[in-house]
Amino acid sequence: LPTPTSSTTIRELEDLAILYRLVDEYQSRYGAAPYNISHWDPSGETLSTVLKALRLPQSPLVAPYIYPGHLGIQQDIVRRLGTFAAEQSCLVVPTGTNAILFATWWLKTLGCTHLLVVCPAYFPAFYAAEIMDLRCTKLYMRRENRSWLLPKDQILAAIRKTPLEIAIWITNPIYCTGKYFDTADVEFLKSLLDRRIAIVADECLCAVGHEVGPNLSDSDLFLGLYSPHKSVCLNAVKFAAMVFDVRYRQLFTDWADVFVGGLAASTHSAVLHFIGDNFSHFQHAFTDRINPVRTAVAQIVRDCGTSLDIDDGSIGHLITCYAPRIRGDAGDQPTFLREFISETGAVVIPGIRNHFSPELGFTFRLNLARACPQFYSALHRTVEYLSRR
Ligand SMILES: Cc1ncc(COP(=O)(O)O)c(C=O)c1O
């Protein structure tokens, strides 16, 4: 057989498989699974509270082929996402992952050969880039005073160093932190677009109203990826939209036949939900459920002293907890993870698996939508264990 030229294994998934083997090990020893305080899915308690506020419209389209480019409500979606430049169009696809693949292909059509991925970031971007022959360089956001900043000097140095056509991939909010780009960083991104450097913003987890897209959309080299239901912890009712300069409309519409095909009525129903009145009602109900959890979690973390930290002013259900005294690569070590799970009865997704800088120490995601008695007990034990380590 010829030697494969690209990755055939996905490191992030192998890492997860190790984690879940440790979970099985714990379960067979103690008869119950450790509680996952990072998992995507909300707890039953959160669901039963917030689902009361969800009114999902049914799509009237049952039989016809729903072409993504012919949905007829693209402008409603763009308007609902924010005040973008007038010349924006959008294309609906079923998932954020579809949008990521499409985005890397768009970069390839622009002639880009090199991608600076500002991390942390959602992992499929690296593999999609590889498929499209984009060479990736990872740079890390800087965390200072419980906030996050773009590594501007490193970005400029990387641009100076490479003779290749370079593009930049950012994730807003900073992946799994609930923290958003500040005004100075948005201005910096604008200056890169002015220098004709393409930017893709993965805003699939962005709380509606906090997008950077509207501020960057004056440039034809900006592409924004959105999936608003994900920001309220809904993953089975959702769609994703790519927002781009109108000059690419035909290109995206045509290539949707290659990357996407026809949409399901459930995707259409999610779009109708988003542009209707109930989305913001649901968003309020979700925020009302999550914000008291945020306050309680902050108290639990800060009560343990200075060995653990979380960000100030996060928005949404996914946040990150930092244990700077423990090495960042501990999150990659089965022996550490085995001890962690066994001592705490909790399981976490370490930040290193989401491309957080190991220099931040051991970091892990907390999903505030998982709040329930087991969540709080697991969090207490986690905080107690990490602060005495
Ligand atoms: C930042 C980010 N972008 C894109 C995606 C992909 O979205 P989907 O699950 O709809 O494929 C995810 C998934 O969790 C994500 O976290």
Image: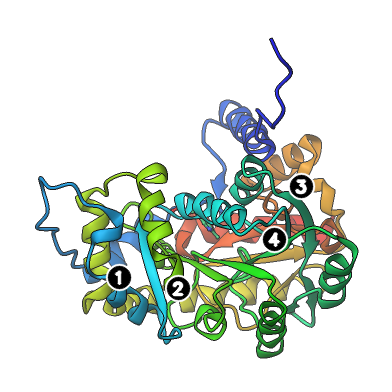
Q: Quadrant of the C terminus?
A: bottom right
Q: Where 109 sits versus 90, above or below?
A: above
Q: Residues within 10 Å of mark 3 (few under 14, many from 20)?
A: many
Give the mark nearer the N terminus: 4 vs 1.
1
Q: In x, y percent, where is residue 80?
A: 33, 80
Give the mark nearer the N terminus: 1 vs 3.
1
Query: Which dot marks residue 290?
Result: 2
Label 4, secondary structure: give it: loop
Q: Nearer the viewer, residue 267 or 364?
A: 267
Cα separation between marks 4 and 2: 23 Å
Question: Closer to us: mark 4 or mark 1?
Answer: 1
Query: Which dot marks residue 331?
Result: 3
Mark 1 highlights which residue? 74
Q: Nearer the viewer, residue 231 or 150?
A: 150
Residue sitting farthest toward the top: 1
Mark 4 highlights which residue? 120
Q: Where 363 sits versus 128, above or below?
A: below
Amino acid type of the residue that numbered disc 4 sits on in the rendered structure: Pro
Label 4–label 1 contact, CB within 8 A: no
Cα separation between marks 2 and 1: 30 Å
